[in-house]
Protein backbone atom coordinates (compact mmCIF):
# COMPACT_ATOMS: atom_id res chain seq x y z
CA UNK A 1 0.00 0.00 0.00
CA UNK A 2 2.80 2.45 0.89
CA UNK A 3 4.41 1.85 -2.53
CA UNK A 4 1.19 2.73 -4.39
CA UNK A 5 0.79 5.83 -2.20
CA UNK A 6 4.37 6.89 -3.01
CA UNK A 7 3.70 6.59 -6.75
CA UNK A 8 0.42 8.50 -6.44
CA UNK A 9 2.24 11.20 -4.46
CA UNK A 10 4.74 11.63 -7.27
CA UNK A 11 1.97 11.89 -9.86
CA UNK A 12 -0.12 14.34 -7.83
CA UNK A 13 2.81 16.61 -7.05
CA UNK A 14 4.14 16.34 -10.59
CA UNK A 15 0.87 17.70 -11.96
CA UNK A 16 0.83 20.35 -9.22
CA UNK A 17 4.27 21.54 -10.35
CA UNK A 18 2.91 22.42 -13.78
CA UNK A 19 0.01 24.35 -12.24
CA UNK A 20 2.42 26.16 -9.92
CA UNK A 21 4.58 27.23 -12.84
CA UNK A 22 1.61 28.39 -14.90
CA UNK A 23 0.32 30.38 -11.93
CA UNK A 24 3.67 31.95 -11.02
CA UNK A 25 4.02 35.58 -12.13
CA UNK A 26 7.52 37.09 -11.75
CA UNK A 27 6.03 40.56 -12.16
CA UNK A 28 3.51 40.13 -9.34
CA UNK A 29 4.88 41.06 -5.92
CA UNK A 30 2.68 38.72 -3.90
CA UNK A 31 2.39 35.84 -6.37
CA UNK A 32 4.18 33.32 -4.14
CA UNK A 33 2.24 34.47 -1.08
CA UNK A 34 -1.06 33.95 -2.89
CA UNK A 35 0.02 30.44 -3.87
CA UNK A 36 0.64 29.68 -0.19
CA UNK A 37 -2.74 31.16 0.73
CA UNK A 38 -4.65 28.94 -1.67
CA UNK A 39 -2.66 25.88 -0.59
CA UNK A 40 -3.55 26.68 3.00
CA UNK A 41 -7.21 27.18 2.06
CA UNK A 42 -7.57 23.88 0.21
CA UNK A 43 -5.55 22.05 2.87
CA UNK A 44 -7.79 23.54 5.54
CA UNK A 45 -10.98 22.54 3.73
CA UNK A 46 -9.68 18.98 3.40
CA UNK A 47 -8.66 18.89 7.08
CA UNK A 48 -12.06 20.11 8.28
CA UNK A 49 -13.80 17.64 5.96
CA UNK A 50 -11.64 14.85 7.38
CA UNK A 51 -12.52 15.81 10.95
CA UNK A 52 -16.22 15.84 10.12
CA UNK A 53 -16.46 12.49 8.33
CA UNK A 54 -13.88 10.37 10.16
CA UNK A 55 -15.48 8.38 12.93
CA UNK A 56 -13.69 7.75 16.22
CA UNK A 57 -10.71 9.89 15.21
CA UNK A 58 -10.68 11.67 18.58
CA UNK A 59 -8.52 14.45 17.21
CA UNK A 60 -6.61 16.45 19.82
CA UNK A 61 -5.72 20.01 18.61
CA UNK A 62 -2.48 19.84 20.61
CA UNK A 63 -1.18 17.72 17.74
CA UNK A 64 -0.92 20.86 15.60
CA UNK A 65 1.87 21.94 17.96
CA UNK A 66 3.34 18.48 18.49
CA UNK A 67 3.58 17.83 14.75
CA UNK A 68 4.80 21.39 14.04
CA UNK A 69 8.52 20.44 13.63
CA UNK A 70 7.55 18.25 10.67
CA UNK A 71 4.93 20.66 9.32
CA UNK A 72 7.24 23.67 9.43
CA UNK A 73 9.91 21.86 7.41
CA UNK A 74 7.35 21.32 4.64
CA UNK A 75 5.69 24.74 4.92
CA UNK A 76 8.94 26.74 4.85
CA UNK A 77 10.38 24.65 2.02
CA UNK A 78 7.21 25.14 -0.04
CA UNK A 79 7.20 28.88 0.65
CA UNK A 80 10.76 29.15 -0.66
CA UNK A 81 10.12 27.08 -3.77
CA UNK A 82 6.98 29.09 -4.59
CA UNK A 83 9.20 32.16 -4.56
CA UNK A 84 11.96 30.56 -6.61
CA UNK A 85 9.70 29.04 -9.27
CA UNK A 86 8.94 32.53 -10.54
CA UNK A 87 12.48 32.80 -11.87
CA UNK A 88 13.44 29.35 -13.18
CA UNK A 89 11.86 26.75 -15.41
CA UNK A 90 10.07 23.91 -13.68
CA UNK A 91 12.31 21.45 -15.51
CA UNK A 92 15.29 23.02 -13.73
CA UNK A 93 13.84 23.44 -10.27
CA UNK A 94 11.96 20.15 -9.92
CA UNK A 95 14.96 17.79 -10.42
CA UNK A 96 17.03 19.79 -7.93
CA UNK A 97 14.21 19.91 -5.38
CA UNK A 98 13.70 16.19 -5.60
CA UNK A 99 17.23 15.20 -4.73
CA UNK A 100 15.57 15.31 -1.29
CA UNK A 101 14.49 11.71 -1.77
CA UNK A 102 18.05 10.45 -1.75
CA UNK A 103 18.91 12.75 1.17
CA UNK A 104 15.94 11.28 3.03
CA UNK A 105 17.23 7.75 2.47
CA UNK A 106 20.66 8.74 3.81
CA UNK A 107 19.19 10.48 6.87
CA UNK A 108 16.87 7.54 7.62
CA UNK A 109 19.79 5.14 7.38
CA UNK A 110 21.93 7.26 9.73
CA UNK A 111 19.41 8.50 12.29
CA UNK A 112 16.47 6.08 12.17
CA UNK A 113 18.63 2.99 11.60
CA UNK A 114 16.30 1.80 8.85
CA UNK A 115 17.72 -1.00 6.74
CA UNK A 116 17.71 -1.47 2.97
CA UNK A 117 18.51 -4.51 0.87
CA UNK A 118 20.70 -4.69 -2.23
CA UNK A 119 17.88 -4.21 -4.77
CA UNK A 120 16.53 -1.21 -2.84
CA UNK A 121 20.02 0.26 -2.70
CA UNK A 122 20.40 -0.06 -6.47
CA UNK A 123 17.01 1.57 -6.99
CA UNK A 124 17.84 4.49 -4.70
CA UNK A 125 21.22 5.01 -6.40
CA UNK A 126 19.65 4.96 -9.87
CA UNK A 127 16.99 7.50 -8.86
CA UNK A 128 19.63 9.73 -7.26
CA UNK A 129 21.87 9.58 -10.35
CA UNK A 130 18.97 10.27 -12.71
CA UNK A 131 17.61 13.19 -10.69
CA UNK A 132 21.01 14.81 -10.11
CA UNK A 133 22.05 14.33 -13.74
CA UNK A 134 18.82 15.92 -14.94
CA UNK A 135 19.44 18.86 -12.62
CA UNK A 136 23.00 19.26 -13.94
CA UNK A 137 21.77 19.21 -17.54
CA UNK A 138 19.16 21.88 -16.86
CA UNK A 139 21.62 24.03 -14.89
CA UNK A 140 24.12 23.80 -17.74
CA UNK A 141 21.43 24.77 -20.22
CA UNK A 142 20.45 27.84 -18.21
CA UNK A 143 24.11 28.89 -17.79
CA UNK A 144 24.65 28.74 -21.56
CA UNK A 145 21.47 30.71 -22.26
CA UNK A 146 21.68 34.27 -23.48
CA UNK A 147 20.56 36.06 -20.32
CA UNK A 148 21.59 39.41 -18.89
CA UNK A 149 23.18 39.64 -15.43
CA UNK A 150 19.89 40.53 -13.74
CA UNK A 151 18.12 37.49 -15.15
CA UNK A 152 21.05 35.21 -14.28
CA UNK A 153 20.89 36.51 -10.69
CA UNK A 154 17.20 35.66 -10.54
CA UNK A 155 17.86 32.21 -11.98
CA UNK A 156 20.55 31.68 -9.34
CA UNK A 157 18.14 32.73 -6.58
CA UNK A 158 15.51 30.34 -7.92
CA UNK A 159 18.09 27.56 -8.13
CA UNK A 160 19.22 28.12 -4.52
CA UNK A 161 15.60 28.09 -3.33
CA UNK A 162 15.31 24.63 -4.90
CA UNK A 163 18.47 23.48 -3.09
CA UNK A 164 17.23 24.73 0.30
CA UNK A 165 13.87 23.09 -0.41
CA UNK A 166 15.62 19.77 -0.99
CA UNK A 167 17.40 19.90 2.37
CA UNK A 168 14.36 21.03 4.39
CA UNK A 169 12.07 18.51 2.70
CA UNK A 170 14.52 15.68 3.41
CA UNK A 171 14.61 16.68 7.09
CA UNK A 172 10.80 16.78 7.13
CA UNK A 173 10.46 13.34 5.55
CA UNK A 174 12.98 11.88 7.97
CA UNK A 175 11.07 13.38 10.91
CA UNK A 176 7.90 11.95 9.38
CA UNK A 177 9.44 8.50 9.48
CA UNK A 178 10.02 8.98 13.21
CA UNK A 179 6.73 10.69 14.09
CA UNK A 180 4.63 8.18 12.17
CA UNK A 181 6.08 5.23 14.06
CA UNK A 182 3.39 4.49 16.64
CA UNK A 183 6.03 3.08 18.98
CA UNK A 184 7.61 6.53 19.38
CA UNK A 185 4.30 7.95 20.69
CA UNK A 186 4.97 11.51 19.49
CA UNK A 187 1.30 12.45 18.91
CA UNK A 188 -1.61 12.54 21.34
CA UNK A 189 -4.60 10.21 21.28
CA UNK A 190 -3.59 8.22 18.20
CA UNK A 191 -3.69 4.56 17.24
CA UNK A 192 -1.90 2.64 14.53
CA UNK A 193 -5.00 3.09 12.36
CA UNK A 194 -5.37 6.87 12.90
CA UNK A 195 -1.82 8.19 13.21
CA UNK A 196 -1.42 9.05 9.52
CA UNK A 197 -4.77 10.86 9.38
CA UNK A 198 -3.99 12.80 12.56
CA UNK A 199 -0.55 13.81 11.28
CA UNK A 200 -1.85 14.94 7.89
CA UNK A 201 -4.73 16.88 9.47
CA UNK A 202 -2.32 18.62 11.86
CA UNK A 203 -0.09 19.68 8.96
CA UNK A 204 -3.02 20.94 6.92
CA UNK A 205 -4.47 22.95 9.81
CA UNK A 206 -1.11 24.61 10.49
CA UNK A 207 -0.80 25.46 6.79
CA UNK A 208 -4.30 26.96 6.97
CA UNK A 209 -3.17 29.17 9.85
CA UNK A 210 -0.10 30.16 7.85
CA UNK A 211 -2.31 31.00 4.86
CA UNK A 212 -4.58 33.20 7.00
CA UNK A 213 -1.57 35.10 8.33
CA UNK A 214 -0.31 35.72 4.77
CA UNK A 215 -3.80 36.84 3.69
CA UNK A 216 -3.91 39.37 6.51
CA UNK A 217 -0.41 40.53 5.57
CA UNK A 218 -1.41 41.17 1.96
CA UNK A 219 -4.54 43.03 3.07
CA UNK A 220 -2.53 45.11 5.54
CA UNK A 221 -0.27 46.16 2.67
CA UNK A 222 -3.23 47.13 0.46
CA UNK A 223 -2.82 44.09 -1.77
CA UNK A 224 -5.71 42.47 -3.62
CA UNK A 225 -6.62 38.91 -4.57
CA UNK A 226 -8.80 38.43 -7.64
CA UNK A 227 -10.22 34.91 -7.31
CA UNK A 228 -11.11 34.77 -11.04
CA UNK A 229 -7.42 35.10 -11.93
CA UNK A 230 -6.18 32.43 -9.51
CA UNK A 231 -7.33 29.30 -11.35
CA UNK A 232 -3.83 27.84 -11.78
CA UNK A 233 -3.00 28.42 -8.11
CA UNK A 234 -6.25 26.80 -6.97
CA UNK A 235 -5.67 23.82 -9.29
CA UNK A 236 -2.12 23.47 -7.95
CA UNK A 237 -3.44 23.51 -4.38
CA UNK A 238 -5.91 20.72 -5.18
CA UNK A 239 -3.25 18.44 -6.67
CA UNK A 240 -0.87 19.36 -3.83
CA UNK A 241 -3.53 18.31 -1.31
CA UNK A 242 -4.04 14.98 -3.07
CA UNK A 243 -0.27 14.38 -3.12
CA UNK A 244 0.06 15.31 0.55
CA UNK A 245 -2.73 12.94 1.53
CA UNK A 246 -0.92 10.11 -0.23
CA UNK A 247 2.49 11.24 1.04
CA UNK A 248 1.73 10.66 4.72
CA UNK A 249 0.68 7.07 4.07
CA UNK A 250 3.76 6.52 1.89
CA UNK A 251 6.13 7.82 4.60
CA UNK A 252 4.49 5.71 7.30
CA UNK A 253 5.23 2.50 5.43
CA UNK A 254 8.90 2.45 4.44
CA UNK A 255 10.40 5.92 4.62
CA UNK A 256 13.89 5.03 3.44
CA UNK A 257 12.49 3.67 0.14
CA UNK A 258 9.37 5.82 -0.23
CA UNK A 259 11.43 9.03 -0.13
CA UNK A 260 13.37 8.30 -3.34
CA UNK A 261 10.18 7.13 -5.10
CA UNK A 262 8.44 10.40 -4.20
CA UNK A 263 11.48 12.28 -5.51
CA UNK A 264 10.67 10.91 -8.96
CA UNK A 265 7.98 13.59 -9.10
CA UNK A 266 10.54 15.54 -11.13
CA UNK A 267 10.19 13.01 -13.94
CA UNK A 268 6.44 13.60 -14.05
CA UNK A 269 7.10 17.34 -13.97
CA UNK A 270 9.66 17.26 -16.77
CA UNK A 271 7.47 15.12 -19.02
CA UNK A 272 4.39 17.29 -18.44
CA UNK A 273 6.47 20.44 -18.90
CA UNK A 274 7.49 19.16 -22.32
CA UNK A 275 3.86 18.44 -23.20
CA UNK A 276 2.08 21.49 -21.78
CA UNK A 277 4.86 24.09 -21.56
CA UNK A 278 6.19 23.09 -25.00
CA UNK A 279 9.72 22.30 -23.82
CA UNK A 280 11.66 19.47 -25.47
CA UNK A 281 13.69 16.59 -24.07
CA UNK A 282 17.10 15.93 -25.61
CA UNK A 283 18.92 12.61 -25.70
CA UNK A 284 20.71 13.10 -22.39
CA UNK A 285 17.50 14.09 -20.66
CA UNK A 286 15.81 10.94 -21.93
CA UNK A 287 18.68 8.93 -20.46
CA UNK A 288 18.20 10.56 -17.06
CA UNK A 289 14.44 9.93 -17.17
CA UNK A 290 15.03 6.27 -18.10
CA UNK A 291 17.54 5.97 -15.22
CA UNK A 292 14.99 7.19 -12.68
CA UNK A 293 12.27 4.93 -14.07
CA UNK A 294 14.68 1.99 -13.83
CA UNK A 295 15.27 2.85 -10.19
CA UNK A 296 11.54 2.93 -9.51
CA UNK A 297 11.15 -0.49 -11.15
CA UNK A 298 13.87 -1.87 -8.86
CA UNK A 299 12.07 -0.51 -5.82
CA UNK A 300 8.79 -1.94 -7.12
CA UNK A 301 10.27 -5.44 -7.32
CA UNK A 302 11.87 -5.01 -3.90
CA UNK A 303 8.50 -4.04 -2.44
CA UNK A 304 6.73 -7.16 -3.73
Image (spheres, rainbow, N blue to C red):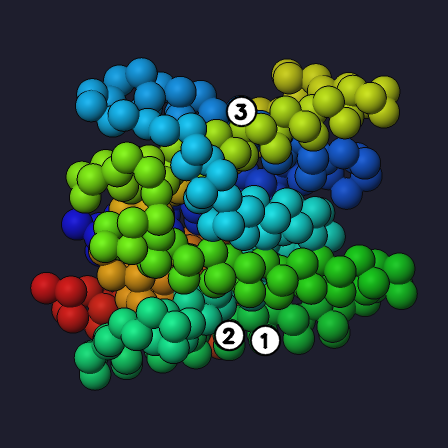
Alpha carbon of mark 1 to alpha carbon of mark 3: how far? 35 Å
At horizontal 81% and vertical 36% (from top left) the residue drawn is 29
At horizontal 68% and vertical 28% (from top left) the residue drawn is 213
- Whether residue 6 is visible here, answered yes or no, is no
At horizontal 47% and vertical 25% (from top left) the residue drawn is 44
Label 2 near label 1: C-beta < 8 Å? yes
| Residue farthest left in this picture | 304
Is residue 8 shown above or below 135?
above
- Whether residue 120 is visible here, answered yes or no, is yes
Which residue is denoted by mark 1 in the rendering? 136
Q: Left or right of 251: which side holds 2?
A: left
Query: Secondary structure beneath disc 2?
Result: helix
- Residue 132: give its label: 2
At horizontal 42% and vertical 28% (from top left) the residue drawn is 61
Front-lying residue, 49 or 277: 49
Front-lying residue, 207 or 267: 207
Query: Secondary structure beneath disc 3?
Result: helix
x and y percentages locating residue 283 in the rendered image: 47, 74
Count of numbered labels shown in the rendering: 3
x and y percentages locating residue 221 in the rendered image: 85, 25
Label 2: few (<14), some or many (≥20) within 10 Å?
some
| Residue farthest right in this picture | 149
Query: Secondary structure beneath disc 1?
Result: helix
Which residue is denoted by mark 3 in the rendering? 41
x and y percentages locating residue 148 in the rendered image: 88, 63
Amino acid sequence: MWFICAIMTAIGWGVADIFYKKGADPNEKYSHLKTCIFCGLVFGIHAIFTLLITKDLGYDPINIIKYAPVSLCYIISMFLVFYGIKYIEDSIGSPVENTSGSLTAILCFIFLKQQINALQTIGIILIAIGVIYLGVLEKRKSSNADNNDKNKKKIFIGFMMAVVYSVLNAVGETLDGYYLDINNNMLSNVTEETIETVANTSYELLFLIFGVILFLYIKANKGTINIKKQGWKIGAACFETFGQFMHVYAMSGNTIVAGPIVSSVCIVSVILARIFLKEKLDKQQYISVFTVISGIICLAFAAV
